[in-house]
Amino acid sequence: MKPDLRVRIGGLELANPVGLASGTFGYGSEYEDLVDVDRIGALYTKAVTISPRPGNRPPRIVETPSGMLNSIGLANPGIEAFIAEKLPALRARRCAVFVNVAGSTEEEYLEVVERIESAGGVDGYEINVSCPNVRHGGLAFGTDPAQIERLTRALRDRTRRPLIVKLTPNVTDIGSIAKAAEAGGADAVSCINTLVGMVIDPSKARPVLAMGSGGLSGPAIRPVGVACCYKAARAVRIPVIGLGGIVRAEDALQYLLAGAKAVQVGTGTFVDPRCAISVLEGIAAWMEARGLARIDDIAALLRD
Amino acid sequence: MKPDLRVRIGGLELANPVGLASGTFGYGSEYEDLVDVDRIGALYTKAVTISPRPGNRPPRIVETPSGMLNSIGLANPGIEAFIAEKLPALRARRCAVFVNVAGSTEEEYLEVVERIESAGGVDGYEINVSCPNVRHGGLAFGTDPAQIERLTRALRDRTRRPLIVKLTPNVTDIGSIAKAAEAGGADAVSCINTLVGMVIDPSKARPVLAMGSGGLSGPAIRPVGVACCYKAARAVRIPVIGLGGIVRAEDALQYLLAGAKAVQVGTGTFVDPRCAISVLEGIAAWMEARGLARIDDIAALLRD
Amino acid sequence: MPFVKQFDAEIIENRPVTESWRELVLSWDGLAETPAPGQFLTLRVSPYSDPLLRRPFAFSGFVGRAAGEAPRASVIYQIRGGATRLLSELAPGARLDAIGPLGRGFPQPGAEETPILAGGGIGLGPLLFLASALAEIGEAPLLVLGLRSLSLLPRIELPEGAVLCTDDGSSGFRGTPVDWISRERPESRPSGGGAAVRIYGCGPAPMLAALSGLAGDRGWAASLSAEQWMACGVGACMGCALPRSGGGFLRACADGPVFDAGEIDWKACL
Amino acid sequence: MPFVKQFDAEIIENRPVTESWRELVLSWDGLAETPAPGQFLTLRVSPYSDPLLRRPFAFSGFVGRAAGEAPRASVIYQIRGGATRLLSELAPGARLDAIGPLGRGFPQPGAEETPILAGGGIGLGPLLFLASALAEIGEAPLLVLGLRSLSLLPRIELPEGAVLCTDDGSSGFRGTPVDWISRERPESRPSGGGAAVRIYGCGPAPMLAALSGLAGDRGWAASLSAEQWMACGVGACMGCALPRSGGGFLRACADGPVFDAGEIDWKACL
Ligand SMILES: Cc1cc2nc3c(=O)[nH]c(=O)nc-3n(C[C@H](O)[C@H](O)[C@H](O)COP(=O)(O)OP(=O)(O)OC[C@H]3O[C@@H](n4cnc5c(N)ncnc54)[C@H](O)[C@@H]3O)c2cc1C
Ligand SMILES: Cc1cc2nc3c(=O)[nH]c(=O)nc-3n(C[C@H](O)[C@H](O)[C@H](O)COP(=O)(O)OP(=O)(O)OC[C@H]3O[C@@H](n4cnc5c(N)ncnc54)[C@H](O)[C@@H]3O)c2cc1C
Ligand SMILES: Cc1cc2nc3c(=O)[nH]c(=O)nc-3n(C[C@H](O)[C@H](O)[C@H](O)COP(=O)(O)O)c2cc1C
Ligand SMILES: Cc1cc2nc3c(=O)[nH]c(=O)nc-3n(C[C@H](O)[C@H](O)[C@H](O)COP(=O)(O)O)c2cc1C
Ligand code: FES
Ligand code: FES
């Protein structure tokens, strides 16, 4: 019997649990020739901010053992150009589309969501709270439960579409942050965003990335992501979406067993554009071999 | 001209900046046939606790991409057996010996240090504050600046030997923790300890480690360690000792450029027991090629 | 403690013995100590950081220095995951960073003891080594080997009289080595004397538990080789803990890998 | 947009052309589009996670489908770090996951433009490809190559009339390609007409900056191929940013790697 791969986030039904992570798949068209995006459950756009942002000075990426650092710096054309140039093609997608939203103040987040709500045509939002809050001394929104709850509540007032809060692992207690998002009315949390990291080139005696530090992603961080997901899934009742270092179906199964309802593939797409599709096929085959009917049945298997 | 490799931690002079990390080199004798320990700057013992601890149920280790998880669980013979059986050989070492100290309450830490102070023969202490504090709801000492400062101050009252506080990276702001250790009177901080991680075996639908989660070490975490070290070195004036994923001299140079005064090799010794020696030789050769006279000259090169 | 050495070994041979098994022969030129059956070495299979850790393998044979030829050590291994896959791709002439001999090997049988060697899977290598070492001191040890199926029989010369057991009955006895021994060797400890039999076991954990149970029932001695994930391989990291009978843990690498059956709680290893 | 494909390429040849350079020939059986000079492919060199990311390499040649033979694409690469070291160890017959053709290649020279191809280092491959493509359309392009020393000259057939420049004067002209061009080709833009010369440049960043400066001074056109770290190679990740003249950034992979000299702030790339 073919397993039922559908999963529900808020009021939205995704065809399957595999998504393409924000910042690694552009706005969906760049990988057109290589990936059949329509087979994927959800596409998360590169972060959109109120004003256009050129992004950080290069170099912006560097490889690390089993991972990579990036300091792209939210490079994006801004909400206006996003709506004019990117949204039409995204609207035509058969998979669910979540816009990843970023800002430096609460108002900026709200305005992006309001503008997209008026334009219509997307399925939901993923709120990137790893950005430094300029009003609060530059510490990221995502490290303070009170700020998270407040921001989520304000966003909740603006949209009935699914609202996902994306958690950063750079905190002492990810469970309390997940709880704050739930209290603020989020429909789901996704975790993890990148870990703060730095690579220094001894021959030049300076950091490889122009910005100094960057965000660590890829297989190197997978154990951290699975542990965060496990904790978050036990802290909240809303769905948890797991990501970090997924390159094979077994990696995604680790997240689903840890309690995630869905997963995302990020850096894995860079390594092999077919990654998300083969992860999806692998999950389905694994469920079929074990006679599991639904995605929820996976998490129920875990014996800890 | 041969560079001067000596570094100073508190009142102690180390012959060179390379150390062997706690938990990866036992009590110094296990690698006897393979490593000339006398060439190393410092040896950090496996954690010592007041009572003997058998450690956690196996499996205790699992490999991850470019890293490994461990949940050894502070397995050690306890302070009494340590003094009777391990200390005599450690005393005879030519390199500096730091005892890594752990406990579940403040009193346990204090008692271990007091007992060793009476016995004598070690060069200093490295305080492992990643252990959950049983009195404070199980959250690690190392995540709370107030607890760190208090514990450090109490330890400071018991010893004039160098006191190193070992920081965990599983916190929102490692700078504030480093500052608390400095305020409490620490002579140095070392960073980083392992990151919390988990690996689940889908075929068995359970975590590979019997304890569920464990500590991630090895090259995978190096970018996180360098970033933490960079931050800690800018937060405090006391020396920072860098570790996490060092396997080659260039890795150690990243830490020294980031502001560390010394480094430790942990998982790297498992991969190649000669690791610490070749790191040391590589640092010396690099300094010589650049005409650097002292270890401090390395950090001065950094252009950020 | 035996003297352990790290050296740059040359691959002399790396030959398929079944679909997923290989026999590796290394030039043991860094010779410090002659390895004993049951001891192991660790290999670093890649200069990259994935796979990262050294991998332990038991010796399956050793040929000392002969006229003009360096000593040779061999290993029989199964391709299981990343490191063994990489290892299988290395050609003769390639070099490997090796450390050994490590751990505590099999003890000699007592004067009154008949050795029975029982095993399967990755236990094959060390048992073959033990069989040839026993043959050299004049013993004619009985080797009882378990396989899932005949097609998995390695293309390796087995000692005379070796008993083959297959799960599917495709060759030899249908059943496990433990089944065979239980049926064919009903004798128990001779009243008043030492153990009649010493079991030497190496194989998957369930087989070790069954061998330990059988030996206990019959009053036989048993020396069993355990497997556990290892990081250091030399006793420093406490990673390879096995549950000790009566509480606490022993290290597979330094206290073992061969243990007297009574030392370990084999059931807790399952 | 050209049509890009991912396919399983077979290594036909992987031959040393200097101590640390190799020429790789792949069977381009996944042919979707014929690559143009200046375009590149990305290769996944290992199934393990270190090295992790795909690596970009410019085409150095392409031979279309001939009777009974699959099309072949070639690449000339330098062993620089982990991935290229691994790549150099692969034998003919091995398979590689390849994606291409990617990026924007070199434009054709204008009717009045004399093409001068200048480069060094890893720029050699794409310039050789361009030279042969230009020769096919009847141009006789001048190729000016820079090397640190004669001993680094690749064992590769160079087009007739190619000028060799060495930093140490061990062969040919002592100096850089930019020095040679500045001295030997003093002409500038003919009054009223188009550019007299189009520089095609590929090489290290300082050479590109110098070529851009020279072209600017002389009023020449210049098409320069830039290098930058890449993650996706298809324009999705914004990782390969290059500073655009007048602010903002362009993507090396999708907007380039070949740019009109005026598009990029080459000095800021140093
Ligand atoms: C003392 C000792 C002697 C050994 N001798 C041999 C031998 O002679 N021949 C041989 O083929 N193998 C032997 N092994 C096992 C061998 O070390 C592993 O098969 C090898 O490390 C697997 O590496 P890999 O990267 O290919 O597989 P991995 O990807 O690391 O593992 C594949 C699977 O194998 C299992 N596994 C791997 N290593 C261990 C372990 N140490 N303990 C328990 N389960 C494990 C796990 O279930 C894992 O999922 C021995 C192990 C020990 C501890
Ligand atoms: C469009 C494009 C075309 C290329 N064509 C060729 C080619 O035809 N032949 C060839 O030999 N190489 C080419 N390269 C460079 C090639 O991709 C790198 O040399 C290779 O990725 C190095 O991988 P590695 O793991 O061996 O070295 P690494 O260990 O990754 O790097 C070694 C050193 O090389 C430098 N480096 C590596 N990659 C880059 C990069 N992308 N940008 C800047 N510096 C870098 C760094 O200084 C680094 O320290 C091209 C690069 C690009 C972007
Ligand atoms: C190049 C790059 C750009 C990214 N940009 C964003 C972004 O704009 N918004 C966001 O929430 N996460 C962003 N991320 C984080 C990823 O979505 C993901 O959380 C992280 O990379 C971990 O997953 P992975 O290991 O599968 O890549 C980015 C990651 C990378 C590698
Ligand atoms: C097996 C193992 C045991 C460890 N035990 C201890 C310990 O007892 N006390 C401690 O402070 N750190 C302990 N650590 C942490 C290391 O000292 C070090 O901080 C960490 O592994 C990161 O460094 P690395 O990547 O070089 O291994 C242990 C690490 C490993 C891998
Ligand atoms: S593997 Fe380290 S103690 Fe056994
Ligand atoms: S490499 Fe991703 S946009 Fe160029």
Image (cartoon, coloured by chain):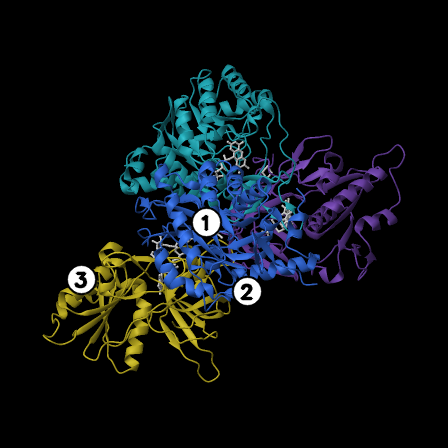
Chain colours: A blue, B cyan, C purple, D yellow
Q: Pinpoint residue B8: horizontal percent, then vertical percent.
A: 36, 26
Circles 1, 2 touching at the beta carbon (< 8 Å) = no
Q: Residue D216: in sight, yes or no?
A: yes
- The residue labelled by disc 2 is A39
Q: Residues within 10 Å of mark 1 (few under 14, many from 20)?
A: some
User: Residue tagged by mark 1?
Assistant: A158
Which amino acid lies under the numbered mark 1 shown in the image of this protein? Arg
The answer to whether C208 appears left or right of D163 in the picture is right
Q: Where A139 sits versus D243, above or below? A: above
Chain where mark 2 sits: A
Disc 3/disc 2 C-alpha distance (Å)? 49 Å
| Mark whose residue sits in front, 1 or 3 | 1
Alpha-carbon span between mark 1 and mark 3 = 53 Å
Left or right of residue B3, residue B221 in this image? right
Q: Position of residue D51 (x, y in %)?
A: 46, 55
In this rendering, do the residues under marks 1 and 3 share a single chain?
no
Which structural element holds mark 1?
helix
What's under tag 3, amino acid-wise?
A: Gly
Marks 1 & 2 on one chain:
yes
Q: Is mark 1 within 8 Å of ligand 3?
A: no
Q: Secondary structure at mark 2?
A: helix
Above or below, C142 relative to D218? above
| Cα gap from disc 1 to disc 2, whole angstroms | 30 Å
Where disc 3 sits, the SS reads: helix
